[in-house]
Structures are given as C-alpha cells and as structure tokens.
Image: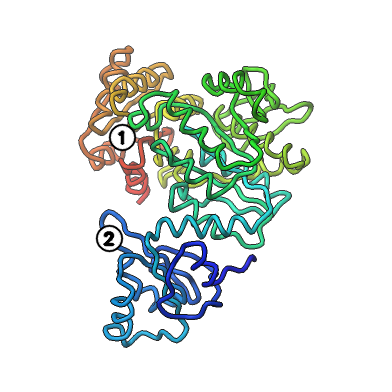
Amino acid sequence: MKKITVKNILKVTNGKLIVGDYNKECKNVLTDTRKIQKGDTFVGIKGETFNGNNLWDKAIEAGANIVIVEGFDALDLLNVKNKTKATLDFSDVAIILVEDTIKALGQLAAYKRSLYDIPVIAITGSVGKTSTKDIVANVVSQKYKTLKTEGNFNNHLGVPLTLLRLDDHEAAVIEMGMNHEGELRYLTNIAKPTISVVTNIGTSHIGNLGSRENILNAKMEILEGMEDKNLVINNDNDLLHKYYEENKSQINIKTFGIENQSDVMATNIVLNSNDSEFKYGDETIKVPVGGEHFIYNSLCAVTIAELLNIDLEEIKQGIENFELTQKRMEIITLKNGTKVINDSYNASYESMKASLQYLAKFNQPRKIAVLGDMLELGDFSEDLHIKVGEEVEKNKIDLLLCMGKEAANIVKGASEAGMELDKIKYYKTQEEIVEFLKENMSSSDVILFKASNGMKFYNMVEMLNL
C-alpha cells in the first residue's frame, strides 16, 4: 500500500489542519458515517437533502481518525471542538478544513492514482458499462490483483472513492458514467487510464445532450486523461465505427465486433437463454449469461486481455466464471418456480431492445415483460418509448405490463405494431402489478423487469419473492 499522510492531504487539497498530527496515515476513505470504522478517514459531502459536513462528530464517535470538512470557519470549528463536543476524544484525531470537499476528494484520489504504475482500464458507454466492467475485471484478475468499481460507483464521487481503495493492486478496472458534457473529462483526469473502452453510443441521456453525436463527443472526453491514447471500441456500433474510420491514423484504436471486420471477432455464435458460446480463432469460449450483448462484452474483455498479454486459457477462465452485478440481467427463480430476469437497474432504448431479444429466447411457454419509464430522454422520449413497444411486438412477447407516465407510449407502440389489446396492461402502481402477477403467474412463466433505476422496479421483484 502506498502511504498517504495528513501532510500529503494538506498539500494536494490546500487544506488547513485545525488539530492533529501531520504524520497521521490515511488508510480508508468514506463519506458515510454509518460505515466508518476505527482508523478510517471521513470526508463530509453536502448532498441535496443533507450535509455530511455536519456529521463530523458522528464520524469521530464511530472511530474516524482523520476528518475532512468544508463550510466552517476555522476558529468556529476549533471552538465547536473545544466546547460543545467535549465528550469526544480528540487525542488521536486530525481535522482538516478545505474549501470544497468534493473537489478535495477528487484531488486526493488523483494523488493516490499517481503513486501507482499499473494498468488502469476505464470503461464508459451508453449501455453495458457495468456488465462489461464485471467481465473485464474478472479476466484481468486471472493475471493481476485487480481493483474494480463496486456497484454503481461510477460518478464524481464513486470514481474517486474507488481509486482511494487502491492497496497492493496490480491493475484497476474503473467504470465511468456521465449525464452531461464535461463529466468524463473530470473523471478521466483523476483516473489517468492506460486503456479506455467505449462500449457503444446509444440514446441514454440524449435529453441532456441533444443528439447521439453529442453523446459521442462527450464519451470521447475519456481520452483527455490519457498520456498514450489506447482506445478499445465496439466496431459494430454505427457512430463508433465511423469514429474509427476517421481517427484510426491518429489514435491507437483496437476494435471488437461480430459484423464489421475488427481486430477481435466472434464466429460460430450459439445463443441460449441461460448461456452462450462463440469461437475465437480455434478456441470455443463459453459465456455464463445469455444474450448477444454478452458476446460483445466478452469480445471487449478478450481485446483488453490481449493488450495486457493475458493468455487464452486465463481469458477463457475469466469469462466462463464471471458474475454480474446485481439487478443487471440477474436471473432469479421465485419460490413458486417462476423465472425472473431482474434487469431493473437502468434502461435506455438500446438496453430495452437487447433485454427483450434476450427474453424472447427463453424456452418458457409464456414470456412477460414488465416495463417502465426510461428517464432523461427529453424531447426524444415519446418516440423512443414507442419504439420499445414495437420491439415488444417484434419479439412476440406474450404479455406486456407497463407502469409510468412515459411507459404509456410503450403501450401505444405495442398496440400500433399489432400486439393484441388483451395482452397489454397498464397500471398506475407497482402494487397493482404485483397483485396481478401473484394471481396470474405460473411456474412456467419467465418475467422481465426493466426500467430506469428511478422507477425502482426491483421493489416488485422483492415483493413477489416474499
């Protein structure tokens, strides 16, 4: 582990030490007082509904020995410490005052990253970031001790907190999300990737960015934090293929694909409901999840593995044994035997389409899609929800259940595409959907739950499984 002290923190954040020892070591950085343990570092973050800076005393009570806060006058903070917090033990605590704790968190993470000369793989894209991260990290970990993004820690707080977990790692796989222009620029200049991946350019957040071309430009900000621009892209995505053709002479771009001629390609693809396989060269690689999009994720992992000189047997092992982050194409069997596809973490038109295609390949007699709103689509929302409805009919889904203001257009799209009206149901609440399913589902059904995370469709999965 690379040692970081209070002195280092003060230097990189331009902070002011209110009390404590310059040589105290920063070991584990957290922003949630509920998770603080003895010896941890607490950074107070001001959110929309609470101000973590005001919980600095709770952090000390929980065992934090370094506290970084903003929004206090230095003298006032010292007075608070001396008077109103008399019951706290400050003998082994350092309190640091900074101008902006979010900025300080990023500065501290960038400093931590600078101490490591290791491969750092940054992964972004409109859809598939997390599942690609999971499979890439598992492949890379076959050769290197690998740090990876946990859960959805892919934003301006999550990326720094992930990098601050660097210990004796030999590689890192970092997921990077964005909603607006400039966000990836910030993240990449903290993480300083050695390899960057763009999985695809779709319609996620198109309401914020205005066009897929603008989304492409925002995604390519990821290159700005790289000294050597090693870029890995899905060559079958139309805009990424165009980008490759226009930039391949200026940037080191490695491509993967199925349709367009690419550096890494799959042949002899076999897609099943629960798994899939493909041939890479003379070798057959098995993927423990169904769906064509997981073939693409696997090809991405192969491409990165070859850049890192990971041998083919290790690649196969890493792909065949990877596990998905929860709520992303998570297959659950309910107590009554009904099979559920819990893909409720996020949704865009492209991921809805892929999930419906995946649902259609199941062997169960009846296939049910429970679909909700896709958020942050702006003026494109109506059209894209209608297109999802068209995909429902195209994939011959047996029953469509919808909830949400925008999801009404999924109903419209499905009915206009020719889906029989008695197979389409629209509800105002999750409880109504759960009640219907409990009364009507059988052990021979397979049910897909898919919507943007803000719709909280994962609650219905939990209610059904009680």
Q: Is residue 191 left or right of residue 343?
A: right
Q: Quadrant of residue 139?
A: top right
Residue matched to label 2: 50
Residue matched to label 1: 440
- Kindly identify the amino acid type of the residue bearing the numbered disc 1: Asn
- Kindly identify the amino acid type of the residue bearing the numbered disc 2: Phe
Q: Quadrant of residue 422?
A: top left
Picture residue at 55% right of the left edge, 68% below the top: 8
Q: Position of residue 129 (x, y in %)?
A: 51, 38
Picture residue at 32% right of the left edge, 26% below the top: 400
- The answer to whether residue 14 is seen in the rendering is yes
Vertical relation: 190 (above or below) 205: below
Q: Dot 2: what SS?
A: loop
Picture residue at 75% right of the left edge, 42% below the top: 310
Query: What's the coloring here?
Result: rainbow
Checking the image for residue 353, the label placed there is none
Crowdedness near tag 2: few (<14), some (14–19) or many (≥20) residues, C-alpha within 10 Å: few
